[in-house]
Amino acid sequence: MNTNSNLYTVIYTTLVVVVVAAVLAFTATKLKPSQDANAKAETLRQMMSAAQIKPTDELYATRNAGILQLYADNIREAYTINLDGQKVGTLSTGRSDIGLVDNLKPQNKAIKDGGDATLPVYIFKNGVIVIPVYGAGLWGPVWGYIAFQPDGKTIAGAYFDHESETPGLGAKIKDEAWFREKFEGKQVAFGEEPAFNLSKNAEATGAANAVDAITGATMTSKGLNEALNIWFKAYGKHFQANVNAEEE
């Protein structure tokens, strides 16, 4: 075949594309189990940081296998609810098949649309209850986990993360322990709107459900505040009808 012909160029290019695509597909298939394991362990680290099962730095120093075992040793039950607050399913807590709802974007959309949301509730053996939150920051998604004391309203701990917030500003929601610690001991007013207030000088009101926003990170703080209130509203019926009722 004439290597200078157009036909040769087309055939050669096609073969290269096919080979590269096959290599990429093979690599992606091989890496997926490892990627999934890393993602699961990361979610568990964030949840257990909020629940204060161990200090955050210790959790991130623990390998994936240890994180799975730590979760299995400390979780009491995990289940899912709908927007009516009704329990609709259970999540496995066994070491080998831990069940999570960690794809929060579609659940966020379902909450906003009033659709068929599947919201996870994680209850640890120390009585702490953990739920996720998810929303939009300045440059991308922000999310986190809020842990409640057994009374179902007092915050025991929090962990926040983001995809692309500004370093030194919005990224402080994840990077600064002092910001997470400000939530400890605060209360969520389930059934009220807003259920929580994260804004400039919010703490000056003296309200139990108020935390000051991060200075210089207005849009990130606003997005996180909206995420908190959207998800607290979604969980409101369940907490009021079930969690709080158990404490009475």
Image (cartoon, rainbow, N blue to C red):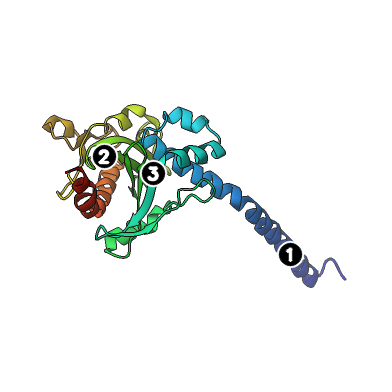
Q: How far apart are marks 3 and 2 (CA)?
A: 13 Å
Q: Of marks 1 and 3, which one's residue comes earlier in the chain?
A: 1
Q: Of marks 3 and 2, which one's residue comes earlier in the chain?
A: 3
Q: Is residue 183 above or below residue 85?
A: above
Which residue is depicted at the point 46% across and 39% down? 73
Residue type at mark 3 is Arg
Label 2 residue SS:
loop
Is 212 on the left-hand or right-hand side of 29?
left
Q: Of marks 1 and 2, which one's residue comes earlier in the chain?
A: 1
User: Is residue 151 visible in this depiction of the protein?
Assistant: yes
Can you identify the residue that label 3 sits on? 76
- Depth check, mark 1 against mark 2: the one in front is 2
Can you identify the residue that label 1 sits on? 13
Front in this rendered view, residue 22 or 110:
110
Residue type at mark 1 is Thr
Label 1 residue SS:
helix
Q: How packed is label 2: few (under 14 Cα within 10 Å), some, or many (20 or more)?
A: some
Front in this rendered view, residue 44 or 213:
44
Is 20 on the left-hand or right-hand side of 142?
right
Residue 116, given in percent of the width and then of the height, sits at 32, 65
Which residue is depicted at the point 26% across and 39% down? 150
Residue 139, given in percent of the width and then of the height, sits at 38, 46
Residue type at mark 2 is Pro
Can you identify the residue that label 2 sits on? 150
Residue 185, given in percent of the width and then of the height, sits at 23, 32
Q: In this view, does 142 lie above or below 90?
A: above
